[in-house]
Image (spheres, rainbow, N blue to C red):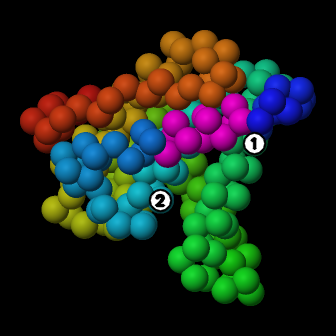
Amino acid sequence: MILRFFRRNDGGETIQRLYGAIVAQARNPAFYTDYDVPDTIEGRFEMILVHAFLLFHRLKDEDGERRSLSQKVFDVFCVDMDSNLREMGVGDLTVPKKMKRVAEAFYGRVGAYEAPLDARQADALGEAVLRNVYASRPEADLQAKALATYMIDTAGALKAIPFETFASGDFPAPSPVRNPSTETAPS
């Protein structure tokens, strides 16, 4: 136990803590109750992708060395997904194929979310969220727009957070609005 004080800290614990904070935010019950995100493996995966994307979006304007925090968190995300697949009983030969789909899903979400988020276009972002998070269920249109508004608001809030906060392992995303269907979304 005392030997851990003499180990060199390579930042791994901080990255794990930051990724853990992203996962904790993604598991906020309001997303599954008030925003009606499916409380399934796929729904939880989508919420982790949303919050990882929001962190990476925040870090994209940092200099190269600081931006590398995104890659470190992405690496931990991939290890976590690999581990989860194995715990669910996916065989060793199938895991690489599934991990390729996980990476494709992540980069697909980035491509779908980036431009409307930058432009603060809740309707366009809501369409991408409806397609990805809600599997294009038309009855989830209001929830998708509310989640898009949450993403836009969160991106704005994270922009005001100094880099050092993330580098210390914190992800201070705001709590989601309860009962968002009564809120108005920016267009």
Label count reads 2
Tell whether 83 sits left or right of 152.
right
Q: Is residue 124 magenta?
A: no
Q: Which residue is mark 1?
A: 71
Badge 1: residue crowd in 10 Å (few <14, some 14–19, many ≥20): few
Badge 2: residue crowd in 10 Å (few <14, some 14–19, many ≥20): some
Q: Which residues are magenta?
A: 13-23
- Nearest to the observer: residue 8 or residue 70: 8
Q: Quadrant of the N terminus?
A: top right
- Residue 49 visible, this orientation: yes
Q: Which residue is mark 2?
A: 45
Which type of secondary structure does the marked residue at label 2 adopt? helix
Tell whether 134 sits left or right of 64.
left
**Residue 58: percent from the left, percent from the top?**
59, 27
Q: Say the numbered circle drawn on residue 53.
A: none
Residue drawn 63% across and 75% down?
A: 86
Q: Earlier in the sequence, mark 1 or mark 2?
A: 2
Residue drawn 23% across and 32% down?
A: 177
Q: What's the residue type where badge 1 is placed?
A: Gln
**Residue 171: percent from the left, percent from the top?**
53, 28
Q: Quadrant of the C terminus?
A: top left
Residue drawn 74% across and 50% down?
A: 75
Which type of secondary structure does the marked residue at label 1 adopt? helix
- Residue 131 visible, this orientation: no
**Outermost residue to the front:** 2
Quarter of the image for residue 61 reads top right
